[in-house]
Image (cartoon, rainbow, N blue to C red):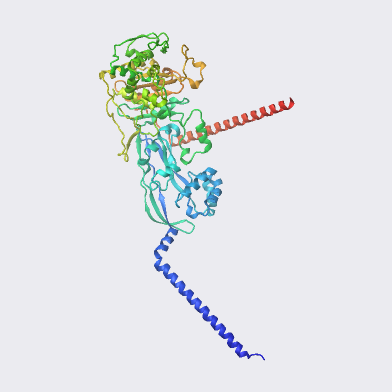
Amino acid sequence: MNKPIASDTEQVNRVFAHRIIIFGLLIFLGLIGLLLRYGYLQVYAHDKYTTQADNNRIKLISAPPSRGYIYDRNGIILADNQPVFTAMLSPDEVENPERTLNLLAPIFELTDKDITDILARLSKSKNDPVTIKIDLTDAQLAQFSERKPFFRGVSIQSKLTRSYPYDELFAHVIGYVGRINDKESKRIDKARYAGTDLIGKIGIEDFYENILLGQPGYQSVETDAHGNIIRQLDTKPPVAGNDITLSLDYGLQTVAQQQLDGRRGAIVAIDPRNGDVLAFVSNPSYDPNPFISGISFKDYGDLREDLDQPLYNRALQGTYPPGSTIKPFEGLGGIHYGLRNWDTTIYDPGYFSLPGDSHRFRDWKRGGHGTVNLKKSIIESVDTYYYKLAYEMGIQRLHDWMARFGFGEKTGIDLPNEKSGIMPSPKWKKDTYDKGWLPGETISVSIGQGYFLATPLQIANATAMTANKGYHITPHLLKSSDGAAAVNVITKPDGKIDYNGKPSDWLRMHDAMESVVKDGTGRGIYTPRYRIAGKTGTAQVKSIAQGKRYDKSAIDKRHWDHAWFNGFAPVEDPQIALAVLVENGGGGSAVAAPIGRALFDYWVLQRKNDPILPPSADELKVIKRQKAFEKIMRDTLRDKEEALAEQAAAQAVAQAETTIATE
């Protein structure tokens, strides 16, 4: 018998009511949970999530300072700041930086190494924006603008970057800035470099980095969900770096570079009254501008592999046998030790032999100079006079005396990586070679050969101390700066060389060096318009066997003698002292001395009334375009020559293979 329908309905209603109660209870519990969670978020964790929310919409953007400008002594700007467009990537807004960079590579011309470097910097950035590319071209900006919606977290910013308007003219002294590398990143104060990727690498840019850098500021901005800036909330402006003025003279630097054009060498000019460096040239040079944004592997490889070594700072780091340039300093040492006076004479038969030794140390003049006193030894550069003097003096005393002129140690110039050269001594040889000193080595050192090595800067500085009658000076490039108060730059003589002779000996040496230009080895540069004191030098590069003569035509050009000239002017009131080196130039009299004369002429006769001034901005553009065109032509010619060489080699191999097959 079936149950009544009413009983089924009541059962269904009870089940339904139970379900409603259960669901109602669950909804109530859910509402309670939501209320509790809402209370937790709004009350207990309010500060935490407010901060996170602000971080999502408020950003702190570093504002890098403008780097201090660098000027020459006349106010001509040597290191400028130019606004450029820079691509930046914010790692907190990019899900896959590597994929993003690979997509950007064809737009910004990024190499695989560029991408690797950027990823390495991103891993250490702590969500700070990282530079992708500096100095974007108009074409790159246009391509990126078309695709910008697809690159969230990548932005274009206008920044100031370094610019060197005169390219290679001051490269070896100003140096350049470049991207901060891993080694530098570990030692720098990261707070001071917030917002900038650049740091002084070499030269003045490196030495005075703390003065030129400045202090960064910041901007607090509100952004939308896509990282676009909505409004600026707060700002702290950066403090620009301090400008510095150098002692260099644009006109004299230009003359020096023009005189060395096409030749390897160096020129350093110093004011003997205070140590101001007036010109500082190493040739060949290079354009420092590509190093700022990152020079290409190809261009850097070309510079490094260039046989003439344009990256090598010959004036500061080049160490060469100084040849006869040292004879004025050495001659004063003979008086200091009481071994000579101005009237002491020796007889020069054209050679010198050590007692008990048949080996002849030859004078440059076959047959000798006859009777020679100190003045004549300077005028005619008599080697034999200095052979005998050094033998009597001994290497230790010769070392101690020459060290007073700064040989064998750094001058202390305000540039990094200066070389000290070598002023040899028995101790030096023992420490270096673990061998004893030989008497014949003293003879070689006496004429600036053998182990004796000096930089052009050292020769110029020793000449300046001779010009100012024995006062010691420290050469320096910094002339002035508001932020350089704490820099210990000595701008006047800091003592006098310990000398046992008469004060008038310095003037008599001036007279002897003036006679070099009037009647001696430097007479080719004599002028009646003002008085020049000088000394020529020819430093042997390739040794010559006993009894043989130097035959320039039979020697490879890179083994020719180095040509030297050092001197000062005007003699009665020295205002400029200099050293000129022409690598493998041949003779100092014929090659280096005329270069010195050109610099003296500009400084003494032309500078005040007709100074050399830099080209205008439009002229500079024309010059830069011409240089760029010449580089393209050189690269094209080189590539064509390499292709022809490869083709010829392939043909030779094919011919050889054909010959072998036939046989």
Q: Quadrant of residue 393?
A: top left
**214 and 455: which is toward the camera:** 455
- Classify 377 as above or below 415: above
- Classify 415 as above or below 260: below
Quadrant showing the C terminus: top right
Question: At which x and y percent is residue 332?
Answer: 31, 18
- Classify 349 as above or below 647: above
Question: At which x and y percent is residue 333?
Answer: 31, 19
**560 and 602: which is toward the camera:** 560
Question: At which x and y percent is residue 233?
Answer: 39, 57
User: In this rendering, does residue 417 appear at all?
Assistant: yes
**397 and 130: which is toward the camera:** 397
Quadrant showing the N terminus: bottom right
Q: Is residue 553 left or right of residue 484?
A: right
User: In this rendering, does residue 180 appear at all?
Assistant: no
Q: How many marks?
A: 0
Please name the residue shown 43% across and 44% down the image. 185
**367 and 253: which is toward the camera:** 367
Q: Quadrant of residue 516?
A: top left
Please name the residue shown 46% across and 21% down the image. 584
Q: Is residue 264 left or right of residue 372?
A: right
